[in-house]
Amino acid sequence: MKSLDEARSVINEIDREFARLFEKRMQAVRDVAAYKQAHGLQIFDPAREDAVIRKNSALIEEEELRSYFVQFLNANMNISKAFQSRLLEGMRVAYSGTEGAFAKLAARKIFPEANLVAFSSFSKAYEAVENGDCDCAVLPIENSLGGEVGKVLDLSFFGSLFVNGVYEIEVVHHLLALPGADPDKIKTVISHPQALSQCDAYLTQKGYTLQEAENTALAAKYVAERGDPTLAAVASEEAALAFGLQKLESHINDKGSNTTRFAVFSRTRKNVDPRDQRFFMLFTVKNEAGSLAKAISEIGEAGFNLRALKSRPTKDLNWEYYFFLEGEGTLSSPAGESMMKALQSTCRDLKILGSFEKDVLL
């Protein structure tokens, strides 16, 4: 058995080596933070952390020490995340809306350490990333009741940004009005078209006149500023608090489950990751008989599951469309590479909008 001084000498030497390796590790963490900022990725990646712990804890041969090494790894990861958070405090994230907007709630949950920047429309938030004013944008792409958000899909097709992550947030709509407003005297309800469609049964039953707004939070702000007791908005509870409105009716969604998928758009597409099992693709097909059917067939023949296919007008020529496709499978695989080659010969325009592991529920 070694003496106490000998044991302490060994520990001191190891600690000196730890210090050197710690600095080296944190430099790599700095590089990871820069990559995440450039690609609009979350700091916390639970699947990645679990995989690292399982892999590295297996390196410990002495069973008695393994659980302590797991604690050591967890502590290292917490330190890394704290350092990344500090580095990313200057990150600017664009969203469409104002206080109480569902997009802001989503952006805050995805990037709790970032500076959130509000814009009055989807296009202005998108353009802020394109021109470098913001690092990324959090925009809605689809709702479980109202379907796709066409304006954002159009931006995806005509714009230059990529999607590197998709997140789900539950949407609960309320009918908001001025304090003291009489529910029986409400005549006009204003909100984003998606929100109005998600509450169609309730609004139709009440017989309100409907008015569209750029988003739900701006609708709530409009009601507060107009001072009209016959005017109400469909918006979030947070919007009610932000603009001093009262809830006349709660949870007026047509169905109990109402979820919106938000995508994070950034200027660069992240590296291909074998863990990515979902992807978005945008394409047009040649004006030839059977071109669309051929493209769909090539995706299936390569072993990829077609989860969704949506068409939108190209706006260049009447009755010409582009297609937004969501697929399931790994594009970095040999099958993915083969599929892409086949599609390039079939499609006229082809863009991989992005790939991601799966939707993250916020």
Image: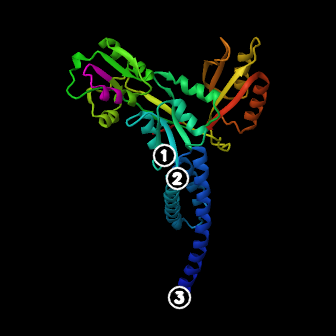
Side of 182 relative to 130 (left or right): left
Give 221 or 110, whichever is nearer the viewer.
221
Q: Earlier in the sequence, mark 3 or mark 1?
A: 3
Secondary structure beneath label 1: loop
Instruction: Check disc 2 and report the residue beneath it.
Output: 88
Q: Position of residue 190 (x, y in %)?
A: 36, 21
Which corner quadrant of the image does residue 59 belong to? bottom right
Side of 323 relative to 49 (left or right): right
Which quadrant: the C terminus? top left
Q: Earlier in the sequence, mark 3 or mark 2?
A: 3
Instruction: Check disc 3 and report the residue beneath it.
Output: 5
Secondary structure beneath label 2: helix
Instruction: Check disc 1 and report the residue beneath it.
Output: 111
The type of residue carrying mark 3 is: Asp
> Over which residues does the magenta segment extend?
221-232
Q: Disc 3 to disc 1, how far (Cα)?
A: 48 Å
Mark number, residue 163: none
Q: Position of residue 138 (x, y in %)?
A: 51, 37
**Residue 73 in sight here:** yes
Q: Position of residue 334 (x, y in %)?
A: 76, 37
Q: Mark 3 or 2, which is nearer the eye?
A: 2
Q: Residue at x 60, y 54 (%)?
A: 32
Q: Residue at x 23, y 16 (%)?
A: 185
**Residue 59 in sight here:** no
Q: Disc 3 to disc 2, how far (Cα)?
A: 43 Å
